[in-house]
Amino acid sequence: MTNPIAQPALASASPIAAVTGSGKVRLAVVTLVVVAIAETIGAVQFKLGPGKVVLMPMLWALLMAAAWGIAARNVPRAVRIDAPLQSLATGLLNAGLLLFVVKLGLTVGGALPQLKGAGWALLFQEFGHALGTLALGLPLALLLGIKREAVGATFSVGREGNIVIIGEKYGMASPEGRGVLAEYITGTVLGALFIAVLSGFVSSLGIFDPRSLAMGAGVGSGSLMAAAVGAIVAQHPGQASEIMAIAAASNLLTSVAGFYFTLFLSLPLCSWLYGKLEPVLGRFSRRDAMREVQGVKLDGALAHGTSARDAALGWFLVGAGVLIGNKLSYNVPLSVSLKGILVAIAIVVACDMLKRVFPRVPLLLTMSVAVTLIGVPGMFPFSDAVIAMTEKLNFMTFTTPVLALAGFSVAKDLPVFRLLGWRIVVVSLTATAGTFLGATLIAEFFH
């Protein structure tokens, strides 16, 4: 097997090193301005056939940030978010998502009785996440003339862990490597917007239990889950707490167990199905739909991690974004929100220090378990105090700064994104729909 770290596609000098202190300040200020504008616009909804689509502030933030990054050469230097700052945004996003995990963990802890009631549905829906992508995406890819790239693009939603799996088994210069890279870029650029519209529309139809939709939202990506849950909650505001708790538990299960599902189940099955289906479906299109994308480099933030200072900046940005959103959209006093944010940051700092001292400690898993236990009323002497201080932090306000950073971070990938062609974009979005709908359908059998 090939070591992905040794591949030229993964080993690049991080552009973050070129970012100055003033550049970081510029990124922080622009990000918070985008968050404030998005929260001021608020939720906009419109009917689409028998259902309706709700566009939340998080989507405005994503679109504005992406447009700002794309237009970097045409905006004044004082507010320009250029390529190095866009790369930095990726690292800040990864760090800022930890605050999002804290909020979700506390929500899960307080809703453990509801999660217990979910029972076997929470376990079996994982098969929908693992197999839904290839069930919809693989046949379509073959009909469109995509070859072995289809295996990398459809065996799972292409996040960081899936890139490592493909890199180890096939190498990133392989067709499978190009396929998973295409899925990664497509999901990063369009995934949050697509799944938010899809989940909101499906939820508005009223044919699925909100708990099933919540399980479908846990696709293993924090930003995608945030977008999907936000759209579902907008349709079912009375069940917001339960939806968030179930989605967080599903996302954790997909992030942890899903790695092994994809490694031992969906990837071998996808490769086997390719061998069986390609001679049948591939004959409908003999064009090589995938262009060769040589020398493509993954973002430096993905390969090199985030420094302690940049992590702190990410926590500050998401925390400040929550303060802005809580005030503008929910009229929560800044002093009340600040107490909750400081508690959340303290938990993240403690877990991050543990990770840096003991690098082998799985940060996401450790933090999720610890925060969930803290969120159980009466579990620890300080549990009730933590719950009281953080309960006014509205879940939706975490998603707006997170997706603003995501918007800036994806702008740098558009040149490569254009090289991959429209066929792989369609396949990638179909795979994303497959993982959401597959898990939702399986969960619905139990509801």
Image: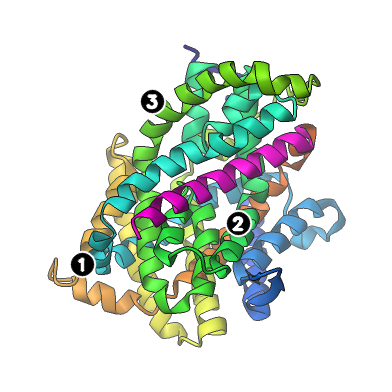
Quadrant of the image occupied by residue 107: bottom left
| Foreground pick, 106 / 68 | 106
Residue 253: x and y in percent read 34, 46
Quickly name the residue at label 3: 264
Crowd band around label 1 with a 10 angstrom C-alpha radius: few (<14), some (14–19), many (20+): many
Q: Is residue 306 visible in the rendered structure shown here?
A: yes
User: Looking at the image, is 323 positioned above or below residue 155?
Assistant: below
Q: Quadrant of residue 374?
A: bottom left
Q: Which residue is mark 2?
A: 405
Residue at figure coordinates x 49%, y 76% from the top left? 323
Residue at the disc numbered 1: 376
Single out the mark in the foreground, 3 or 1: 3
Please give left or right for residue 12 compared with residue 223 in the image.
right
Residue sitting at the far right? 74
Which is in the foreground here, disc 2 or disc 3? Answer: 3
Residue flagged by tag 2: what amino acid is it? Leu
Residue in the image at 64% along x and 54% along y? 194
Q: Nearer the viewer, residue 222 or 363?
A: 222
Q: Classify residue 16 by image quadrant.
A: top right
Which residue type carries mark 1? Val
Q: Are marks 3 and 1 in contact (CB under 8 Å)?
A: no
- Between the residue at mark 3 and the residue at mark 1, the CA separation in whole angstroms equals 34 Å
Task: Give whichever of discs 2 and 3 has the lower sequence position.
Answer: 3
Query: Relative to residue 372, is residue 362 depicted above or below?
Result: above
Q: Is residue 310 left or right of residue 337?
A: right
Q: Is residue 390 magenta?
A: no
Residue 24 position (above or below residue 6): below
**Range of the magenta residues?**
420-447
Is residue 404 visible to us here? Answer: no
- Label 1 sits on a secondary structure element that is loop
CB atoms of marks 2 and 3 within 8 Å: no
